[in-house]
Amino acid sequence: MKKVLAEYLLISLLLLSACSVRYSFSGASIPIEANTFSVKLFQNMAPVVVPSLSSTFTEALKMKMLTGTRLNQTDEDNADLSFEGEITGYSIAPKAITADEVAKQNRLTITVRVKFENRVDPKQNYDKSFSQYDDYNSEVNFASVETGLIDNITQNLVEDIFNAAVANW
């Protein structure tokens, strides 16, 4: 019985070591052959342009890939995983209207178009838009909350993009 159990464990370990996908605590499943990633600057093509949004978003995506994967960043065009795209939307709209038709809350929405290329597993490639929002009290001066809203929305967008690229969600 002990010999059968030992053989079973040995075979199981051999099978597990032969897998070509690594899983990490971040939930990422990246082909073992992948070693590098690149993120090109996401140009802000939205009708309303916030000057710092391009760099804020691009750097947040780079940081997520650095901290959430084992991959090394490169600026080369032939990275194993690559991200490029543009910011296509930045809008503020009323969210909750009161009885006297006054907006009690407003919603900031940011939309990003992402082209993701996985040179190791091209079936994972995508070209799609991601959109996230955050609400704020309309009685507050927008300029005083804009940076915080952008940071929250950016983190949610980056999480969605990361999950679509390497978590297979």
Image: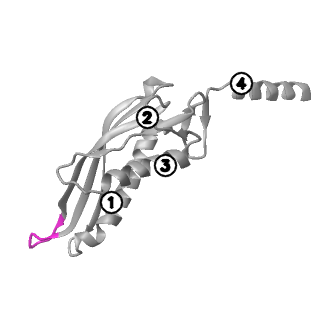
Viewport quadrant of the C terminus:
top left
For label 2, the residue is: 82
Tag nearer the camera, 4 or 3 = 3
Label the magenta part by its dominant secondary structure. Answer: loop
Does 110 sit above or below residue 27?
below
Mark 3 surroundings: few (<14), some (14-19) or many (≥20) residues within 10 A: some
**Residue 52 at x, y = what percent?**
31, 57
101 in the magenta segment: yes
Does 136 sit above or below residue 159?
below
Q: CA distance from mark 2 to mark 3?
A: 13 Å
At 50% from the left and 30% from the top, the residue drawn is: 80
User: Depth check: 58 or 91 in front?
Assistant: 58
97 in the magenta segment: yes
For label 1, the residue is: 150
Mark 2 surroundings: few (<14), some (14-19) or many (≥20) residues within 10 A: many
- Is 89 left, or right, of 168 in this rendering? left
Q: Earlier in the sequence, mark 4 or mark 3?
A: 4
**Residue 60 at x, y = what percent?**
43, 52
**Residue 77 at x, y = what percent?**
43, 31
Q: CA distance from mark 1 to mark 4?
A: 45 Å
Q: CA distance from mark 4 to mark 3?
A: 31 Å
Q: Which amino acid, by three-letter code, is at mark 3?
A: Lys
